[in-house]
Image: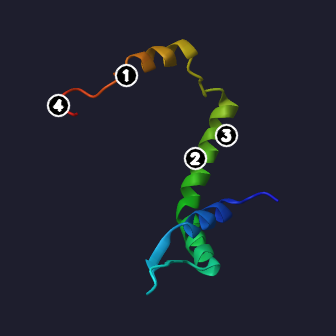
């Protein structure tokens, strides 16, 4: 069985305590509430996901998708300092 995006969001919400009861035990959302929240979340982000997927598919078909050469990536990574400047530390 494959896990859908809805399942993944609902599972992530299962790990978030919403309050503690009188005994100090964490209380979590029930499955129905988690699924409702995940469904609402998906309804908001689905148009953006679809737009991004369509754009990626379009780039694959017209050949405009580019892959950066490894040397370019390695050189760019080498220019990142190992520590923050004194002003930001």
In the image shown, does 32 or 69 lie closer to the viewer?
A: 32
| Residue 86, position as x, y percentages in the image | 19, 27
Residue 87's label in the rendered image is: 4
Residue at x 58%, y 63% (from the top left corner): 12
Residue at x 46%, y 76% (from the top left corner): 18
Q: Earlier in the sequence, mark 2 or mark 4?
A: 2
Badge 4: how crowded within 10 Å, few (<14), some, or many (20+)? Answer: few
| Residue identifier under label 2 | 52
Q: Which numbered mark, 1 or 2, is in the foreground of this view?
A: 1
Can you name the residue that lies furthest to the left here? 87
For residue 47, which quarter of the picture? Answer: bottom right
The CA span between labels 4 and 1 is 16 Å
Q: Earlier in the sequence, mark 4 or mark 1?
A: 1
The CA span between labels 3 and 4 is 44 Å
In the image shown, does 50 or 34 lie closer to the viewer?
A: 34
| Residue 4, position as x, y percentages in the image | 71, 60
| Residue identifier under label 3 | 57
The CA span between labels 2 and 3 is 9 Å
In the image shown, does 69 or 30 lie closer to the viewer?
A: 30
The CA span between labels 2 and 4 is 38 Å
| Residue 58, position as x, y percentages in the image | 64, 38
Check disc 4 and report its element: helix, strand or loop.
loop
Residue 80's label in the rendered image is: 1
Relative placement, left or right, of 86 versus 58 is left
């Amino acid at each position: 069985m494959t896990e859908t995006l809805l399942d993944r969001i609902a599972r992530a919400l299962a790990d978030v305590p919403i309050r503690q009861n009188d005994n100090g035990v964490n209380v979590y959302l029930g499955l129905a509430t988690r699924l409702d929240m995940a469904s609402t979340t998906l309804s908001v982000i689905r148009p953006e996901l679809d737009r991004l997927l369509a754009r990626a598919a379009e780039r694959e078909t017209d050949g405009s998708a580019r892959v950066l050469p490894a040397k370019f990536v390695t050189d760019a990574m080498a220019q990142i300092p190992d520590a923050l400047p004194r002003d930001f530390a």
